[in-house]
Amino acid sequence: MKLATLRDGSRDGRLAVVSKDLSRSLAVPDIAPTLQAALDRWAEVEPLLRVAAERVEQGAGDAFDPAQAMAPLPRCYQWADFSAYVTHVELVRKARGAGMPDSFWTDPLCYQGAGDCNLGPTDPIPFSDAADGIDFEGELAVIVDDVPAGTSIDHAARHIKLLVLLNDVTLRNRVPAELAKGFGFFQSKPQTAFAPVAVTPDELGAAWNGECVDLPIRVTRGDELFGAPNASQDMVFKFPRLVEHVAATRPIGAGAIIGSGTISNTDRSVGSACIAERRAEETVAKGAPKTAFLAEGERVRMEMLDGDGRSIFGAIDQIVMRR
């Protein structure tokens, strides 16, 4: 099942069921007005949404326009992002001459992001100063129902209800000063953009094993395929482990988004899902980076295709634009 939030002039939009081929959508206000409302009553609402999804497959609804889609959750109560692909952290640290603590391989890195104003798939990447070092980061995330405090990894997967594709924009040149304070990211992490639809795990078929997604993310910068790393390869901390981590000491409310961090593979021939990684490669190999960060007017596109070449989440397709 595929779900979208359509623009209706409100902050939270209106929930719609979308066809598997992303061609049609059907608003379902009689079932749940918003995706958050559906997640609050997921056990009750999911069967009704699946009936509506069958109707859409039979031709009900209207043409689906991704430009009319907001983020699936335009406002979320929790946005926790990880660095589950430790090879990415290792490479970036190596480029700046920093070692890797052993704990990074056993205890996941996590920061608490801002989910109060998420961007839709075709919204511009807004910026104030190009000198901030505008970067994209292609990621997957899961959306959960209510997760009790202390949930173990063995029970975490049952709380994963939806998956989303996202662009976690980062202002790289603001990162060092913030990290030096020892209190995490804030100004260096502006608004995050999401693909048009959130999908239930069964939409991924054999590519979803209950822990990760065995498909590449395709990241295009302008007309160039920037990278296509596989989302299951080199994912040291799988999604159930990430859910367990965020719920270790407190309950996690329905609608929380839990991100994987930049998808990254040790096989460098597949390219990268962010500019910082390519710059780190260039620094390690040649002593200095060559690839520039994003400039005004540049276009970034992210998508994940199934084994038959069909888009799963729809595409994130953004232009960098001054505020």
Image (tube, rainbow, N blue to C red):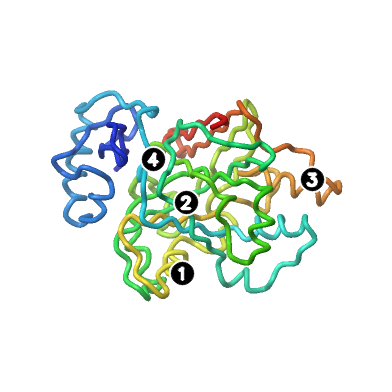
- For the point 56% across and 38% down, which residue is it? 218
Q: Of discs 4 and 3, which sits in the foreground? A: 4
Residue type (three-letter) at the residue carrying disc 2 = Val
Q: Of discs 2 and 4, which sits in the foreground? A: 4
Q: Position of residue 95 (x, y in %)?
A: 77, 55
Q: Find the distance from the CA under tag 2 to the CA under tag 3.
A: 29 Å
Asked whether, in this view, residue 63 is left or right of residue 45, the answer is right
Q: Quadrant of residue 273?
A: top right
Q: Residue furthest top?
A: 63
Q: Specify whether residue 27 is in view.
A: yes
Asked whether, in this view, residue 19 is left or right of residue 169, the answer is left
Residue type (three-letter) at the residue carrying disc 1 = His
Q: Position of residue 294 (x, y in %)?
A: 65, 35
Location of mark 3 (residue): 282
Q: Earlier in the sequence, mark 1 or mark 4?
A: 4
Q: Position of residue 320 (x, y in %)?
A: 57, 31
Location of mark 4 (residue): 71
Q: Residue furthest right?
A: 286
Location of mark 1 (residue): 245
Q: Find the distance from the CA under tag 1 to the CA under tag 4.
A: 25 Å
Q: Find the distance from the CA under tag 1 to the CA under tag 2.
A: 19 Å
Label 4 environment density (alpha carbons within 10 Å; few <14, some 14–19, many ≥20): many
Q: Position of residue 106 (x, y in %)?
A: 58, 72
Residue type (three-letter) at the residue carrying disc 3 = Glu
